Image (cartoon, helix red, strand yellow):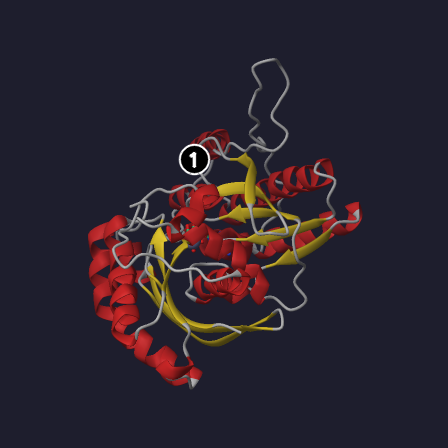
């Protein structure tokens, strides 16, 4: 029945949470997040140096608040967890060094967590979540992947984007439409009054060397270019762009392609369970289309709770308690951080000597 203090600073959200797992049930006893989004919005994207500085300022207060909110003291905490990879190196260092220091001071194990394993675990925070084996569609600012998760927690990637991640496409298209950063929520809002069938946009497929197309891989760069060409053409013809229709058409084609390829992947794998996680999983149209598409195919779908789709520390805590529940895990106090690290090698984070 592990209870952990979890920290997350891999990108532009500083976060601390306390998570408990008992009898297969995950409880978020506290979850505190300080978003830096407004500060980065001025620059149209995340500025790494600013992100690190804000984490340094925000994290101690968030930890204090999370411990107060949870009602737990150090005697009741079994471990300290922190994201150690992948992400912005300078930003990752803040949670890593804070987590390792707290673990050393309080004599608790330190559990380094892979950020994407955190996103995968976020679905466990949903009521009535299914258990593996299932296929996960992970859609965030940096990743678009289809991952098969087995009963023992092992993971195997089945599909990926060959260029932009889905969230990146939202961010770039939002910039093109003058909607600001982060693009996902801005496009979702702009699309509310739009007609999603106004513009016909490409679904971006990846050719196979022997002919045909990869069934589950994604490409969003062609869609981005199609949006650019459409906007250029419209600008020549009109004074004002039909922003709502453009946003709705873009959002719809992204949802359609994600739903179609994920469901095909689940069925080809002989499974009937699909999980949707990551920042883009907060998109209401995608959530709706995924639920409808899955129901039509007899596939059960679990989606991360809205509040735990974008970066947060509760999902890092969920990943850590899952690991601790399976057996004793501990990361080296000498472990550093890694900007890039494959999800399939996340078990190496508990190796001695550490992988980085
Ligand atoms: O998971 P996340 O918080 O950070 C990464 O690990 O990348 O995902 C951030 C991404 C951004 O690209 C953002 O535009 C997108 O998630 N996003 C959304 C929505 N909310 C956030 N995309 C579409 N619709 C949303 N409502
Ligand atoms: Zn993330």
Which one is nearer the viewer's eye here, 193 or 257? Answer: 257
Q: Residue at x 57, y 51 (%)?
A: 153
Q: Residue at x 46, y 46 (%)?
A: 167
Which one is nearer the viewer's eye here, 354 or 36? Answer: 354
Mark 1 Cα-neighbour bin, 10 Å: few <14, some 14–19, many ≥20: few
Counting from the top left corner in percent of width and height, residue 151 is at 64, 52
251 displayed left or right of 175 = right
Name the quadrant containing residue 268. Answer: top right
Counting from the top left corner in percent of width and height, residue 264 is at 70, 37
27 displayed left or right of 169 = right
Counting from the top left corner in percent of width and height, residue 241 is at 46, 43
Name the quadrant containing residue 213. Answer: top right
Q: Residue furthest top?
A: 210
SS for callout 1? helix
Q: Report the residue marked by disc 1.
A: 235
Which one is nearer the viewer's eye here, 40 or 124? Answer: 124
């Amino acid at each position: 029945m592990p209870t952990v203090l979890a920290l997350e600073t891999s990108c532009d959200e500083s976060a601390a949470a306390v998570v408990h797992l008992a009898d297969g049930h995950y409880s978020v006893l506290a979850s505190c997040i300080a978003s830096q989004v407004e500060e980065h919005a001025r620059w149209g994207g995340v500025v790494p140096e600013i992100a690190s500085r804000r984490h340094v300022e925000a994290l101690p207060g968030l930890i204090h608040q999370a411990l107060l909110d949870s009602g737990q003291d150090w005697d009741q905490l079994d471990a300290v967890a922190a994201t150690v990879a992948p992400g912005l190196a300078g930003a990752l260092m803040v949670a890593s060094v804070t987590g390792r220091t707290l673990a050393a001071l309080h004599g608790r194990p330190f559990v380094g967590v892979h950020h994407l394993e955190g996103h995968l675990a976020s679905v466990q925070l949903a009521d009535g979540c299914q258990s593996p084996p299932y296929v996960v569609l992970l859609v965030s600012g940096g990743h678009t992947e289809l991952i098969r998760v087995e009963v023992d927690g092992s993971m195997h990637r089945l599909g990926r984007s060959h260029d932009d991640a889905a969230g990146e496409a939202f961010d770039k298209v939002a910039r093109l439409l003058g909607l600001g950063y982060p693009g996902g929520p801005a496009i979702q809002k702009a699309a509310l009054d739009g007609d999603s069938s106004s513009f016909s946009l490409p679904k971006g497929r990846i050719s196979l060397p022997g002919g045909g197309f990869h069934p589950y891989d994604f490409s969003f760069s062609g869609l981005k270019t199609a949006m650019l060409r459409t906007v250029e053409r419209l600008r020549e013809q009109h004074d004002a762009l039909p922003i709502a229709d453009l946003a709705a058409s873009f959002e719809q084609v992204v949802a359609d392609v994600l739903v179609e390829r994920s469901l095909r992947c689940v069925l080809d794998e002989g499974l009937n369970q699909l999980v949707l996680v990551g920042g883009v999983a907060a998109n209401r149209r995608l959530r709706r289309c995924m639920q409808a598409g899955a129901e039509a195919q007899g596939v059960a779908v679990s989606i991360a709770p809205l509040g735990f789709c974008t970066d947060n520390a509760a999902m890092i805590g969920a990943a850590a308690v899952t690991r601790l529940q399976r057996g004793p895990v501990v990361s080296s106090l000498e472990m550093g951080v890694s900007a890039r690290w494959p999800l399939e090698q996340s078990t190496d984070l508990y190796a001695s000597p550490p992988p980085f």
